[in-house]
Amino acid sequence: MQCRFAEYDGFRKQRKITRREAFLAEMDRVVPWARLEALIEPHYPVAGNGRKPYPLSTILRIHFLQHWYGYSDPGMEEALHDIPVLRRFARLDAGTSRMPDETTILNFRHLLEAHRLAESLFQEVVSLLTERGLILREGTIVDATLIAAPPSTKNEGRKRDPEMTSSKKGNQWHFGMKAHIGVDSKEGIVHSVCSTAASVSDVHMLPDLLHGGEKKVWGDAGYQGQIEAIREAAPAAQDMTSRRVKTKAGVDQAEKRKNRTKARVRAKVEWTFGVLKRVFGFTKVRYRGLKKNHEWLCASFALVNLYRKRKRLARIDQRLASPGA
């Protein structure tokens, strides 16, 4: 079969902007690349006697592609060879650039873990959103979600991950870890992240999820009765956690109506988990151990924040860049 030039990207007669291209273009505009790269640059390898390192901007973009599309290190290497739109986003040219191999991608992730840079990236994004007026810090919604880990023992050590545990939700047992987050009650932006084994109760992490300046703290009925912990972490905060409505006398209808009103505010935290699990596909742990998965979660929630506010951020940045702003 004879191939025409139109078969190659860039020579097609009719070109459609795909959903992937549109998504990457949006994220390219709102990610604060310069600020994030400035945090990593002091720890990033410099050119010397060995092989010249890839530009930091390229490797960071590849790392974020793994968060958005769930590629493993070998899968990311293959995707860079196969998919032109990913190469363009990473600023790689198949004709002149060497494609990073899986070891290079792995080493960058280990660099972030060694210096806890993912937490720094998360805090930098939170600072950016605060500067743009997208985090008001008047109230916090606290919640946790289970993230599954492989329960199988069919591995070299014949053991499960010792840092993961089991937890019962409803009538079903889950093996894995928990991601605990504190979310701004007005804008739905994650400002605090903690990671624990699945068996750790949600209430134990409550003080770590508050920044101290809250006027109200929202949570589901699992956080009921923690008024002292809330007052200790945020002295001015009002306890707005849901209450249990079933009593020996029956269902407390008044409390049930209050819980329904509170649920309208608490729903914002579920949107955040929805982006993490349904848009980014993070439903199972990627690595063994809590530390590596916590670092991955910090970077993921930073990107979740940017994704959820991408349209408003683009408008704000456009207004700030316009003459006379």
Image (cartoon, helix red, strand yellow):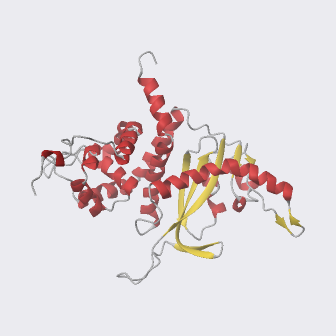
Query: In this orientation, which residue lies closer to the viewer: 120 or 9?
Result: 9
* Screen quadrant of the N terminus: bottom left
Q: Quadrant of residue 254?
A: bottom right
Q: Residue furthest right?
A: 249
Looking at the image, which residue is at 57% across and 38% down? 135
Counting labels gives 0
Q: Is residue 278 above or below residue 41?
A: below
Q: Is residue 138 visible?
A: yes
Q: Where is residue 65 in the image (x, y as percent from the top left)?
A: 35, 52
Q: Where is residue 51 in the image (x, y as percent from the top left)?
A: 14, 52
229 displayed left or right of 118:
right
Q: Can residue 193 be seen in this view?
A: no
Q: In this view, does 126 lie above or below 67?
A: above
202 displayed left or right of 103:
right
Q: Residue furthest top?
A: 324
Q: Where is residue 287 in the image (x, y as percent from the top left)?
A: 40, 66
Looking at the image, which residue is at 56% across and 44% down? 189
Looking at the image, which residue is at 36% across and 50% down? 64
Q: In this view, does 141 lie above or below 292?
A: above
Q: Where is residue 193 in the image (x, y as percent from the top left)?
A: 53, 53
Query: In this orientation, which residue lies closer to the viewer: 208 or 278?
Result: 278
